[in-house]
Image: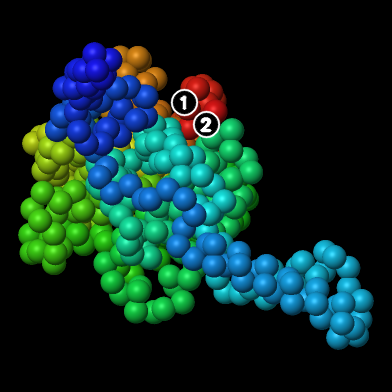
């Protein structure tokens, strides 16, 4: 009897003990860092780290996905039927075990259905890839807000555009990670199939599906890094045409242009900012590729799109109204400091002007016109580029070395210097102009040395390791 009372007392004492953690789910930051979360709206760990606390309440159920077991049963049934037919002599031509298995698998898996890599990759790995993207890729491709992505990424029902974007995020994350080579190819093939299937229905192309453009940006970068230059170039062309088709550069043409977003006020500005960043990332990609290719730009600097706000305010949910590119180039926008992303856009624009300068110079030579206008334009671009290079990087070296976008912006500026010198070499100048060429040659040599140093510094960032 005494033992029974003692046991009861212990059980009651155990039941009245307070849990070390509050009810609910741990936030994404505590999950990533494997810390104990206090389950508060803004947990103490996130407060101490100075990051935005995000809790994902829509996690998918564990175990095989719906229909996966049914598909396996269908494959087994098909294989058994083929074996019975072979045993009963119904198959005229004998086939090997490998051919029999291929036949069974192809019978139950139509070629039109894309394999889902999440059926082969564990949920933990896929979640880790999401974290890898925002830690290693987002600093170089700042087109997504972390909080908004995680708010829809685990929804059970996603649109086809968002599903393609999520797959592209994980594909590029696997591409910059050296630990998942076997996952990389499977994710890439599935993502391309998903994105290409979106284009099979023309009605999808007229909808405001900028997530599709974001996905192709990420896939183009992956292909430049992991597949081939030509494949990345073709995917980049898709990006430019989709940007034009969806008229994304007109996002800020009028205050009324944002009213078609059927969203709450807190989400509307985030979507608008992501669209701006998508336009400008495509624009930088266009300028960078054509500086190497010596081609013509598809997207122009006349975009009616505000410059991107600083990254910290964007991620923390503090909207800031930025100016336009023309104002920044003219030096009349003093409302807010330029972000490293915006500085990259400015230098890409000035360097991109060397491309039109090259083509105009060639046309002037073919027509036999005097080269005075060519030389005046050349000096104007050179002066503007030099001034913005000095203005954009009048900050401590430590700040430059910690921001990959600033380093990339400086590389684009140096590419513009080299492009100007290349134009000088291919143009038959007058004797009084030729005497100035050694100075330009010295600047080009310095730009080449600077580019080598910048490229080495970029290699130290995690996204290039």
Callout 1 crowding tier (Cα within 10 Å): few <14, some 14–19, many ≥20: some
**Of 172 and 452, which appears nearest the observer?**
172
**Of 103 and 187, which appears nearest the observer?**
103
Q: Pick out the residue farthest to the front.
A: 1
* Distance from Cα at disc 2 to Cα at disc 1: 6 Å
Q: Is residue 438 left or right of residue 272?
A: right
Q: Which residue was labeled with disc 1?
A: 461
Q: Quadrant of residue 247?
A: bottom left
Residue 220 visible to an observer of this rendering: no
Q: Is residue 106 left or right of residue 394?
A: right
Q: Residue at x 73, y 71 (%)?
A: 79
Residue 213 x/y as whole percent: 37, 59
Callout 2 crowding tier (Cα within 10 Å): few <14, some 14–19, many ≥20: few
At mark 1, the secondary structure is loop
**20 shown above or below 309:** above
Residue 65 x/y as whole percent: 46, 58
Q: Which mark is residue 273?
A: none
Q: Which mark is residue 464?
A: 2
Q: Residue at x 88, y 68 (%)?
A: 96
**12 shown above or below 53:** above
């Amino acid at each position: 009897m005494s033992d029974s009372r003692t046991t009861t007392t212990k059980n009651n004492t155990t039941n009245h003990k307070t849990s070390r953690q509050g009810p609910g789910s741990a936030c994404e930051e505590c999950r990533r860092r494997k810390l104990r979360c206090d389950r508060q709206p803004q947990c103490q760990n996130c407060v101490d780290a100075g990051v935005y606390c995000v809790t994902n309440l829509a996690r998918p159920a564990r175990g095989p996905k719906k229909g996966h077991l049914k598909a396996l049963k269908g494959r087994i049934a098909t294989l058994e039927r083929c074996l019975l037919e072979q045993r009963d002599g119904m198959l005229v031509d004998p086939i090997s075990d490998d051919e029999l298995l291929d036949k069974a698998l192809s019978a139950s898996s139509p070629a039109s259905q894309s394999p889902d890599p999440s059926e082969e990759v564990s949920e933990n790995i896929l979640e880790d890839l999401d974290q890898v993207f925002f830690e290693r890729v987002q600093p170089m491709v700042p087109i997504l807000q972390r909080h908004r992505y995680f708010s829809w990424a685990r929804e059970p029902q996603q649109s086809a555009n968002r599903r393609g974007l999520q797959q592209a995020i994980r594909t590029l994350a696997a591409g910059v990670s050296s630990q998942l080579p076997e996952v990389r190819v499977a994710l890439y093939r599935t993502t391309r199939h998903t994105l290409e299937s979106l284009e099979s229905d023309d009605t999808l192309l007229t909808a405001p599906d900028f997530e599709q453009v974001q996905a192709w940006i990420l896939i183009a970068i992956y292909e430049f890094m992991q597949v081939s230059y030509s494949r990345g170039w073709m995917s980049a062309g898709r990006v430019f045409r989709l940007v034009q088709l969806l008229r994304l550069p007109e996002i800020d043409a009028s205050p009324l242009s944002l009213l078609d977003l059927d969203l709450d006020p807190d989400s509307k500005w985030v979507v608008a900012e992501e669209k701006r960043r998508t336009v400008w990332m495509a624009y930088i990609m266009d300028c960078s590729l054509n500086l190497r290719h010596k081609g013509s730009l598809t997207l122009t600097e006349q975009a009616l799109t505000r410059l991107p706000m600083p990254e910290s305010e964007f991620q923390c949910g503090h909207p800031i109204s930025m100016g336009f590119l023309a104002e920044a180039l003219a030096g009349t926008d003093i409302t807010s400091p330029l972000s490293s992303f915006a500085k990259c856009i400015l230098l890409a624009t000035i360097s991109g002007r060397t491309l039109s300068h090259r083509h105009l110079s060639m046309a002037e030579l073919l027509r036999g016109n005097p080269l005075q206008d060519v030389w005046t334009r050349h000096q104007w671009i050179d002066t503007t580029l030099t001034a913005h290079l000095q203005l954009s990087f009048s900050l401590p070296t430590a700040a430059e070395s910690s921001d990959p976008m600033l380093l990339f912006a400086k590389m684009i500026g140096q590419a513009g210097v080299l492009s100007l010198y290349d134009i000088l070499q291919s143009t038959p100048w007058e004797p009084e102009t030729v005497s100035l060429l050694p100075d330009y040659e010295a600047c080009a040599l310095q730009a080449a040395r600077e580019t080598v140093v910048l490229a080495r510094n970029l290699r130290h960032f995690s996204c290039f390791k």
